[in-house]
Image (cartoon, helix red, strand yellow):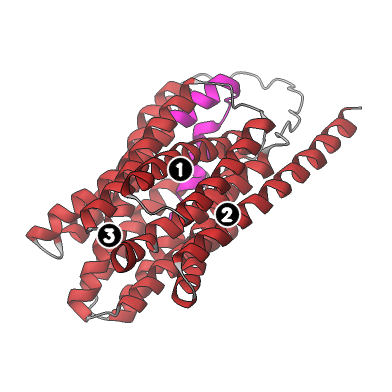
Amino acid sequence: MNTLDKRYLIYPAAFLVNAGITMLNFSVIFFMRRTYGTSPALIGWMSAFWAFAYLTGCIGLGGISRRLSYRRALPLATFVMGISTLAILTIPWELSALFWYMLFGLITALHWPPLMGWLSEGLEGRNLSRAVGGFNLSWSTGAGSGPFIAGMLIERSLTLPLIVIALLYGFMAALYLTTFTLSQRRKSRIAEVPELDIPKVKDQSSPLRFAGWTGVASSYTLLGALMFIFPMYAEDVLGYSESFTGLLLFLRGAVTVAGFYVAGKTIFWHHNPVQIGISQLLLAATALLLAFAAHPGTYLILFTLFGLIFALQYATSIFHGVSGALNRERRMAIHEGSLTFGVVLGSAGGGLLYQRFSFQIVLIITALAVAAAALAQLASYRTQSDHKKAASR
């Protein structure tokens, strides 16, 4: 498959697979509570277990996915994701549902890094930026659509979303398998040519990759606090309606999608350490301002600003993580692991701080941590730049 051909598969796949993930994460809350009477605390832990399982998969399944290659890893991952969803529905046991939900999170790590590594294969510069921009638009649109679709399905039947998700992943597994089989047959018809003595390509990894991974972990830490802790604070303390809180979160997501589009069309942020430092400091300032916000209009402005910063830091992490790298799937696994670590830190750590202190303390500590991470970004960039200069001599 050439670059254009594979995008015709990767972009719809990113939309559908992520829509299925967010559908499951949304609908499993209602399924567990209404089927088993699961406590809110256990449901919260389920989300943390899911994220931890995914993080574990990003770290531990890299060797397996490289041996399988994306041609086998993608259909296998989506097939197991479908089976796991079906098992949650059909096995009437609360602990069994928790097991299959964690397996779903674990096996998801066999999907995203291979898919993103395949997408970035052979691309650099503006072409890489465009490919990443289209990918980000696809998965983020799917992320926004999933809960909305699940909500409509739940109103019809509690089990309908899980059935639809299982069928969706069955379709994706079949689509991957069919596409790769046909592609392989097409290649086998091409006459073999003598192998050329091609010199080995040197690794030209960007020294900004560590700063990018730090930035995306920082953004997801704040996102975890805003997604999982802020709704409780908004209801308990601010007295905001669920619809207004939902509007704030939707606005953040919509602005992020727009930010991904702009990032895919521009190059000013490529290999630009100043941009990374400014984004990190703006993120820290946004967290601090959110801690002292007291007016709905202020929240609208700050959530909008966070959406833009989030888009830039996410795109920065992917772009600089794979730019010039040889093993791109491994780099995408590190990217995914970084953001998952951030969301676990923001949701679980933020929940503990909120319960013991206040939401203001959650945001102040987040702001301080993000500002400290900016120093780590600067140090990593200088160290990697020095190593790169020494290697080129």
Please report the residue visible at 27 percent of the width from the left and 69 percent of the height from the top.
88
Tell me the element at label 3.
helix
Quarter of image, res 281 = top right
Please report the residue visible at 38 percent of the width from the left and 31 percent of the height from the top.
258
Who is closer to the viewer here, 108 or 177? 108
Q: Are marks 2 and 3 in contact (CB under 8 Å)?
A: no
Q: Identity of the amino acid at label 1?
A: Phe
Residues at marks 1 and 3, CA–CA distance in whole angstroms: 23 Å
Q: Which residue sits furthest right?
A: 393
Q: Earlier in the sequence, mark 2 or mark 3?
A: 3
State the residue position of label 1.
306
Residues at marks 2 and 1, CA–CA distance in whole angstroms: 13 Å
Tell me the element at label 1.
helix
Q: Residue 310: x, y in percent?
A: 48, 42
Quarter of image, res 133 = top left
Residues at marks 2 and 3, CA–CA distance in whole angstroms: 28 Å
Which label is found at residue 361?
none
